[in-house]
């Protein structure tokens, strides 16, 4: 709820800082904070893990998971981010996933549920404020997923616990929600209720004449450039739906293997 209500306020707050300090200065500061934070946490985790761990294989596994989470964030940062304020998705959803895994006690399902909340956040904000972003932002959904991975990776690296799995039907809700979203989008696209793009429609409303419009602009070309020369890619709906489904499935498979500790 906080994410949904605060989404636009964070963007407006950021734009106010940019107007006061200058975009380059603000973006440079954000990158420095992000890099310093990741390196500091990595050193702290690595030293602490190697000192306190009683089982080397588990230490290597959790550290590997942490480095993979950083790599995912770096790839997402390199390909999908057009404004440095977007890196706020990483710590925001990392904290949410950290809280989720403590409450749920299941690694993959915590990621799935937090990813679903990220999808819900972006969808609600698109429906309420389509003028701010003229397309359903699958880029941000993927950034939210990467943040969730960082959160659970941090939990395992710090606690040195093996991947958690709780076999109870209620904890399968996370998977059900993710695949229900993928199924609904797929059925909607096939039936025409969901339109992939409609550049001629009024961008003030995401739902028009019983149709849910995913974008008010065309997605080509593949690479786009900001005014400051930053290259980025906007994910089309089909790309985003498939990638989120694949990533969630991969997390499930990895966690199934990881519980065999």
Image: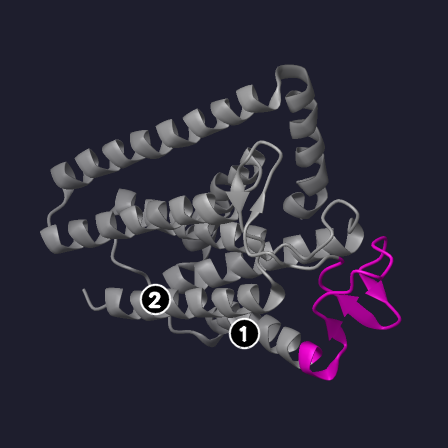
Give coordinates of residue 175: x percent, y percent: 49, 71
Residue drawn at point x = 28 percent, y = 52 percent:
65
* Residue ID for mark 2: 165
Q: In this rendering, is residue 244 above or below 92? A: below
Query: Which secondary structure is most common in the magenta stretch?
Result: loop
Which image quarter holds the C terminus?
Answer: bottom left
Mark 1 neighbour class, 10 Å CA radius: few under 14, some 14 to 19, many 20 or more: some
Q: In this rendering, is residue 22 above or below 151? A: above
Q: Is residue 193 left or right of residue 240?
A: right
Give coordinates of residue 210: x percent, y percent: 85, 73
Q: Is residue 160 left or right of residue 252?
A: left
Q: Is 143 or 61 nearer to us in this picture?
A: 143
Q: Secondary structure at mark 1?
A: helix
Mark 2 neighbour class, 10 Å CA radius: few under 14, some 14 to 19, many 20 or more: some
Q: What span is colored magenta in the figure?
A: 188-216
The question of residue 172 being in magenta is answered with no
Residue drawn at point x = 65 percent, y = 53 percent:
121
* Residue ID for mark 1: 179
Residue 147 numbered mark, or none: none
């Amino acid at each position: 709820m906080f994410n949904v209500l605060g989404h636009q306020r964070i963007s407006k707050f950021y734009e106010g800082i940019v107007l006061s300090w200058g975009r380059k200065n603000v973006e440079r500061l954000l990158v420095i904070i992000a890099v310093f934070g990741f390196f500091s946490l990595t050193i702290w985790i690595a030293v602490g893990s190697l000192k306190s761990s009683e089982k080397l294989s588990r230490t290597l596994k959790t550290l590997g998971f942490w480095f993979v989470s950083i790599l995912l964030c770096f790839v997402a940062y390199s390909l999908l981010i057009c404004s440095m304020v977007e890196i706020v998705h990483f710590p925001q959803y990392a904290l949410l996933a950290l809280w989720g895994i403590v409450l749920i006690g299941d690694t993959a399902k915590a990621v799935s549920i937090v990813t679903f909340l990220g999808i819900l956040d972006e969808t609600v904000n698109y429906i309420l404020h389509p003028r701010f972003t003229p397309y359903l932002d699958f880029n941000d959904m993927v950034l939210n997923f990467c943040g969730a991975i960082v959160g659970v990776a941090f939990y395992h690296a710090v606690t040195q616990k093996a991947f958690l799995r709780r076999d109870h039907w209620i904890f399968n809700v996370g998977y059900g929600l993710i695949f229900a979203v993928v199924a609904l989008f797929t059925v909607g696209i096939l039936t025409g209720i969901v339109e992939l793009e409609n550049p001629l429609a009024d961008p003030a409303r995401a739902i028009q004449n019983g149709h849910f419009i995913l974008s008010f602009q065309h997605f080509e070309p593949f690479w786009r450039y900001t005014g400051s020369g930053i290259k980025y890619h906007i994910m089309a709906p089909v790309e985003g739906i498939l990638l989120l489904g694949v990533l969630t499935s991969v997390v499930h498979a990895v966690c199934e293997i990881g519980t065999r500790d």
